[in-house]
Amino acid sequence: ARQWDRFPLACLALADGDGAGGGIYELLSRALRRSDAPVLRSVGSDLVGVTAPVALINGLDRVETVLIVDGYHHLQQATSRDVLSALLIHGSPRLHLVLAGRGDPGVAVGRLRVRAELLELGLNRLAFTDEEVADYASGVNCVSDPAVRGALRLTLGWPQGVQMVLGQVDPVGAVRSYFDREMIAWAALRERLERVAQLETLTARSVDALTGGDDGQVWLESLDDAGFLLLPLDDVREAWRFHPLLAAYLQGRLDDLLRG
């Protein structure tokens, strides 16, 4: 946003359940009407009824615009994601659409990727460097070198993990509470996850061997696409490993890892 501050800007922050039943236009309208730019507030006011799709595409063609959609993974309805796909496919080349969330966006980014019109930032690109972890530790009055080294080893620079391990009075409780909340959405998979949590390398063959199934590759790819904390070990999606904190949580050894 700072880089593009010369352009009109609107930001939509999504929560679980947003965009159900076609309500994405109402949410976009609200975000545009909150913009500091009069032209975007005007576009937001026009997003009503059956003309909303055309009004959105034509309206955003009036001026170079930055539209940020944060938490897009909360858009589970295909109709809502179709709206974002339409913006990418039929929208103005003057629109800079920023999607922030977990996993594959579920919108039509393939052609943009082929045309080199897409910038993708994943977990590895967003991870804190050693220096950034040390800076954060200093900011929360944690100046112990062993603690900083331990945080690097356990979090691999994952920002949320760094905050929990270094910035909380009870890091074990913080990490456990975080994954407890996350596992609500993965409850149906938890038993299977725990059965393979001891594996240092997750492959279709190793997962099938432990679970007795024959869909290990599809299952692992679905976890990866959904933004699960799997770390790729190759470029062809054949091998992964769990993030160290997630593995410890699934194995029930967070206490030993974080207090030891």
Image: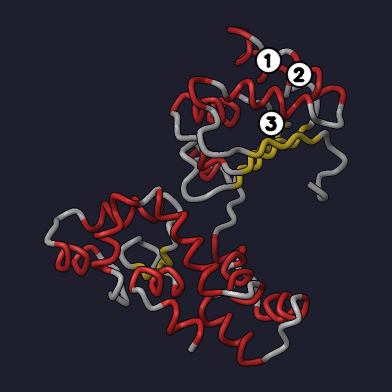
Q: Earlier in the sequence, mark 3 or mark 2?
A: 2
Q: Position of residue 43 (x, y in %)?
A: 76, 18
Q: Colour scheme of this structure image?
A: secondary structure
Picture quadrant of residue 76 = top left
Residue 87 image label: none
The residue beneath circle 3 is 93
Mark 3: few/some/many CA within 10 Å (<14, 14-19, 20+): some
Q: Nearer the viewer, mark 3 or mark 1?
A: 1
The residue beneath circle 2 is 43
- Residue type for callout 2: Val
Image-based side of 65 in relation to 99, left or right = right
Mark 1: few/some/many CA within 10 Å (<14, 14-19, 20+): many
> How far is disc 3 from disc 1 in space, using C-alphas?
20 Å
- The residue drawn where x is 52% and y is 70% is 173
- Residue type for callout 1: Leu
- Labels 3 & 1 near each other (Cβ < 8 A): no
Picture quadrant of residue 206 = bottom left
Image-based side of 182 in relation to 130, left or right = left
The residue beneath circle 1 is 47
Q: Specify whether residue 97 is in view.
A: yes
